[in-house]
């Protein structure tokens, strides 16, 4: 009886998605073809992106429709299973995109798009004997940063901690371990670990976990499990009054006003000064899931100068996106300019030689999820026995995936 009910629900879901795709993926009431974009942004971010699409579709035979969801993976998987994918989807996980490319769900980029698929944001893949790029970075962020208030004296290393993030709870902890490993062991070891070559039980990975435990010593790490990474009520962890330093990427600035600043984590966190010429980065990347000239044209415009200028103009000051290339328009506020310098080549005072993509977002989804869960268990009981047990479990998952298709690399130079 329960099995029949589940089957009925799946059929109902499929039918609903097919109807939705027919309504949004065909022609609109004005005779214009609708191109659907599925993405992770909601609230003010979604509003700015929607206004961008509205301006881009002016004077075209298309209507660009944005659907934002905080359950992106689940929504996209359901749509693919119902054979009703969006025209374009925006994801932050290269590991997921790689799976979709191998399954034949993605269309290789064509025309002017392929040259904009800059590594490490979008490496070339060999699928069925042919080399292609399958996604392009739209919005990028730099993660190897520590934020403080400019007006508040810093109690040394009073760290803000919040791990709760709905379906991706635990990712702030994976960022800590990734950043520590990158700066203590270097880009080469980081890349081998992120791409499944370096074991989780290796000295480099053990060192990263042990270093994080030392940095968190004396803090109530267990309480962080229930605190949102955006702070209680989405007001920002630095506004809690209980901490003075926050390890986070540039996306976090939307929570604050102009009275915050950042420094590279290698200059701030004790013991991370060994490889100052490397930075961990992330991105929201777009791929074509429904092959059509309309989808490819939209993606080309979003990744081009016109789309990026419009997007910057529509976004609020703290939400203005960073783009991957030194030739792209960038935010002009002081913090935005500072971050753009690190992302696109650096200066003589702050050179950037290596950008390394977020390791967990590079890993296959099952390993990424296991990593996030392990972080939560470790924070609950941050001792050596727990660490050894968790790393052995993660290593078992890595070995299970051995031989699976992996990304060719995750580190590279800033885009020209």
Image: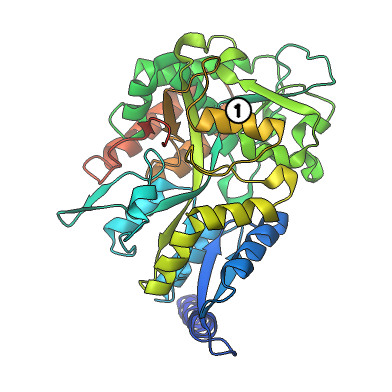
User: From the viewer's perspective, is residue 414 above or below residue 125?
Assistant: above
Whether residue 330 sits left or right of residue 115 in the image: it is right
User: From the viewer's perspective, is residue 290 above or below residue 278?
Assistant: below
Report the residue that reaches farthest toward the left. Answer: 129
Relative depth, front residue between 250 and 103: 250
- Is residue 194 something one can see in this rendering? yes
Whether residue 370 sits left or right of residue 126 in the image: it is right
| Quadrant in which the C terminus appears | top left
- Residue 287 in percent (x, y) is at 41, 59
- Point 70% across, 61% down: residue: 47
Which quadrant of the figure has residue 250? Answer: top right
- Is residue 377 something one can see in this rendering? no
Which residue is identified by label 1? 379
User: From the viewer's perspective, is residue 229 above or below residue 272?
Assistant: below
What crowding class fits label 1: few (fewer than 14 Cα within 10 Å), some (14-19), or many (20 or more)?
A: many
Which quadrant of the figure has residue 107? Answer: bottom left
- Residue 64 in percent (x, y) is at 56, 72
Q: How is the image coloured?
A: rainbow
- Point 69% across, 56% down: residue: 314
Whether residue 95 sits left or right of residue 254 in the image: it is left
- Residue 201 in percent (x, y) is at 35, 22
User: From the viewer's perspective, is residue 261 above or below residue 16?
Assistant: above
- Residue 207 in percent (x, y) is at 44, 15
**Element at badge 1?**
helix
- Point 51% across, 24% down: residue: 346
Relative depth, front residue between 100 and 149: 149
Which quadrant of the figure has residue 404? Answer: top left
Q: How many marks?
A: 1
């Amino acid at each position: 009886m329960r099995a029949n009910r589940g089957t009925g629900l799946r059929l109902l879901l499929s039918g609903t998605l097919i109807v939705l795709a027919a309504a949004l993926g065909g022609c609109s009431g004005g005779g214009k073809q609708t191109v659907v974009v599925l993405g992770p942004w909601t609230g003010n971010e979604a509003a700015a992106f929607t206004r961008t699409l509205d301006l881009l579709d002016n004077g075209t035979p298309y209507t660009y429709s944005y659907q934002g969801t905080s359950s992106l993976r689940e929504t996209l998987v359901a749509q693919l299973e119902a054979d009703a994918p969006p025209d374009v989807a925006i994801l932050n996980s290269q590991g997921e995109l790689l799976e979709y490319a191998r399954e034949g769900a993605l269309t290789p980029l064509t025309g002017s798009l392929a040259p904009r698929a800059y590594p490490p944001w979008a490496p070339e893949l060999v699928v069925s004997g042919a080399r292609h790029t399958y996604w392009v970075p739209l919005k990028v962020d730099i993660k190897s940063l520590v934020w403080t208030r400019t007006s508040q004296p810093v109690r040394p290393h009073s760290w803000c901690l919040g791990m709760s993030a709905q379906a991706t709870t635990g990712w702030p902890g994976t960022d800590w371990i990734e950043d520590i490993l990158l700066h203590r062991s270097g880009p080469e070891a980081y890349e081998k670990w992120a791409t499944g070559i370096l074991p989780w039980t290796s000295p480099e990975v053990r060192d990263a976990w042990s270093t994080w435990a030392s940095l968190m010593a004396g803090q109530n790490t267990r309480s962080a499990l229930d605190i949102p990474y955006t702070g209680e009520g989405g007001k920002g962890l630095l506004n809690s009054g209980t901490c003075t330093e926050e390890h986070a990427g540039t996306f976090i600035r939307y929570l604050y006003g102009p009275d915050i600043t950042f420094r590279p984590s290698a200059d701030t966190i004790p013991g991370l000064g060994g490889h100052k010429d490397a930075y961990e980065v992330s991105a929201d990347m777009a791929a074509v899931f429904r092959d059509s000239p309309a989808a490819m044209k939209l993606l080309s415009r979003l990744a081009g100068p016109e789309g990026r200028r419009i997007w910057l103009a529509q976004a609020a000051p703290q939400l203005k996106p960073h783009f991957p290339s030194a030739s792209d328009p960038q935010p002009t506020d002081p913090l935005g300019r500072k971050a753009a310098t690190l992302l696109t080549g650096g200066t003589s005072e702050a050179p950037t030689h290596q950008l390394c993509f977020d390791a967990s977002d590079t890993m296959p989804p099952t390993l990424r999820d296991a990593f996030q869960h392990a972080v939560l268990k470790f924070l609950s009981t941050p001792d050596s026995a727990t660490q050894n047990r968790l790393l052995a479990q993660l290593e078992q998952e890595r070995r299970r995936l051995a031989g699976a298709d992996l990304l060719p690399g995750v580190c590279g130079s800033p885009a020209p």
